Amino acid sequence: MKKRLYFVICMFVLLVLTGCGEQTAEKSETITEKMNQDKVVQLDKVDISHLTDDNVIRVESQPSFAYSGQTVDDVYSHSDLIVQGKVSDTYFTTIDGMAYTVMEFEVEDVLKGNAEKNSTITTLTLGGYTTLREHIEANDDAFRFADISEDKWDTTYLESYTLKDGYPKKGEKYVLALVDDSTFVKGVYSTLNIYEGMFKYDNGQYRRTLPEQNYYGNKKKADKTYFQNDTAFQYKWFKEKCNEIKTKK
């Protein structure tokens, strides 16, 4: 019988705006940065060629945020960039022992911020795979994995997950609310509050993927820009609301 290791570690509490933590670029010296005219940043990729059902330890990330992203106004106000487009590439990277999903994102429309249509940007969101070795070397917690010999650290993975619908895939369309995370990794954007800044296209509408069905509770709000849990919306409506907020400001 296949055996899979499971445990939950509350690895961090996020009290910053981006969901990436108060880490600095100096701590990410292993990252190779290569900028081009599309503002694409090449990060070190996690080799998942040895990934199987038997060598993954699943780690549920339980972040908290400094503010809520429940309304269009929340999302607009706390974002540096809001774009609509599609994923051109995706992979996993490790920064300071933490797993991140990297999206190279083709911008089709810009609702807020400084980006060019038809350009490609690089975004990070928390969650993905890292090798056990990278995690242990960054966190000095080999004692947690005493039952795994060191010769297996490179082929054992930690999966840190927050999104209930899995990871973004090439070709998928999104509206992304992003924060400029250049103090973390130069030239990179992070999704606002991880999942609160991601709206995935599905059957003609965009829907936010949240970790729980009842994430925000069931209380109805008079504010029509309020996102009630996984409420779906037409892009035209969202764009109009963003333009109204922009005009007021």
Image (cartoon, rainbow, N blue to C red):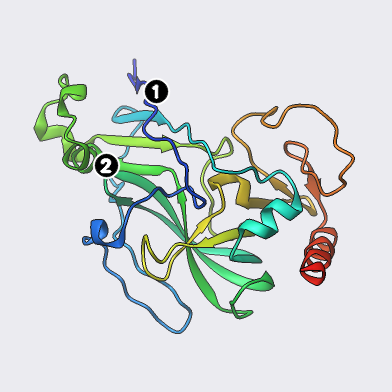
Q: Residue at x 48, y 80 (%)?
A: 38
Of callouts 1 and 2, the N-terminal one: 1
Which residue is outermost to the bottom?
37
Horizontal side of 156 relative to 210 (left or right) equals left
Picture quarter containing residue 27?
Answer: bottom left
Residue 50 image label: 2
Query: Is disc 2 surrounded by few (<14), some (14 to 19) or many (20+) residues within 10 Å?
Result: few
In terms of depth relative to the viewer, which is nearer, 22 or 32? 22
Q: Quadrant of the N terminus?
A: top left
Horizontal side of 194 relative to 73 (left or right) equals left
Residue 146, horizontal then vertical, whole percent: 15, 21
Q: Residue at x 52, y 74 (%)?
A: 120
Residue 13, horizontal then vertical, whole percent: 43, 35
Horizontal side of 223 relative to 41 (left or right) equals right
How many angstroms separate mark 1 from mark 2 (CA)? Answer: 23 Å
Badge 1 is on which residue?
Answer: 8
| Callout count | 2
Compared to 135, does 84 lie above or below? below
Residue 142, horizontal then vertical, whole percent: 16, 29
In terms of depth relative to the viewer, which is nearer, 102 or 220? 220
Q: Quadrant of the C terminus?
A: bottom right
Contact check, label 1 and label 2, Cβ < 8 Å: no
The three-letter amino acid code for the residue at tag 1 is Val
Compared to 241, does 142 lie above or below? above
In terms of depth relative to the viewer, which is nearer, 169 or 119? 119
